[in-house]
Image (tube, rainbow, N blue to C red):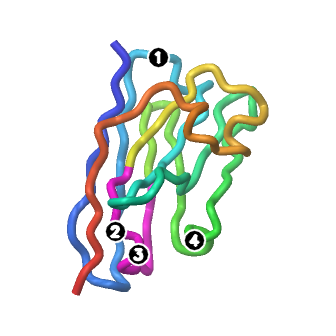
């Protein structure tokens, strides 16, 4: 059974930091393109960052503009985990954050970061940035 389980969300003040984690199971993790996406109320789901798997990018990362310089995505293929380190958080970062996997990626999947390419999703973890 394929599972993606996120943790680490919460409420933080502007300027603060949070680390989100995702534990994956039930599929060949090391070759999957993995990503973090977010969705705020009334808005579309958007990519935060993606990280390529073995054979289709080998750990290369792509960040959305709002995440560059503040967020860092990483993966541990020995533990089947995905991490998103978020620093200098702003109120506009408030959203539900989702871990996602494209289990059968092409060489373009992670670079493009289209949510429709990702076939497995976690339940999400809420991040609220508020003073």
The percent position of residue 103, horizontal first and vertical second, equals: 56, 22
Furthest residue toward top: 1
* First in sequence: mark 1 vs mark 4: 1
Give the secondary structure at mark 4.
helix
The percent position of residue 64, horizontal first and vertical second, equals: 62, 61
Q: Residues within 10 Å of mark 4 (few under 14, many from 20)?
A: few
Quadrant where the N terminus is found in the figure: top left
Which residue is found at the position 47% from the left and 37% from the top? Answer: 100
Cα–Cα span, label 1 and label 2? 30 Å
Camera-side residue of 46 and 57: 46
Q: Which residue is mark 2?
A: 94
Give the secondary structure at mark 3.
helix
The percent position of residue 63, horizontal first and vertical second, equals: 63, 59
Against 47, residue 99 (above or below) is above
Furthest residue toward right: 107
- Judge whether residue 50 is colored magenta: no
* First in sequence: mark 2 vs mark 4: 4
Which mark is drawn over residue 27? 1
Q: Which residue is mark 3?
A: 92
Q: Are marks 3 and 2 in contact (CB under 8 Å)?
A: yes
Q: Are marks 1 and 4 in contact (CB under 8 Å)?
A: no
């Amino acid at each position: 059974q394929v599972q993606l389980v996120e943790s680490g969300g919460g409420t933080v003040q502007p300027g603060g930091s949070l680390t989100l984690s995702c534990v994956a199971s039930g599929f060949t993790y090391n070759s999957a393109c993995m990503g973090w996406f977010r969705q705020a109320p009334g808005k579309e789901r958007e990519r935060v960052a993606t990280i390529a798997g073995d054979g289709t990018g080998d750990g290369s990362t792509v960040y959305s503009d709002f995440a560059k310089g503040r967020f860092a995505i990483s993966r541990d293929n020995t533990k089947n985990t995905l991490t998103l380190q978020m620093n200098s958080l702003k109120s506009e970062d408030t959203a539900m954050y989702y871990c996602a996997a494209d289990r059968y990626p092409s060489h373009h999947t992670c670079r493009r970061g289209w949510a429709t390419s990702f076939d497995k999703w976690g339940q999400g973890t809420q991040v609220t940035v508020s003073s």
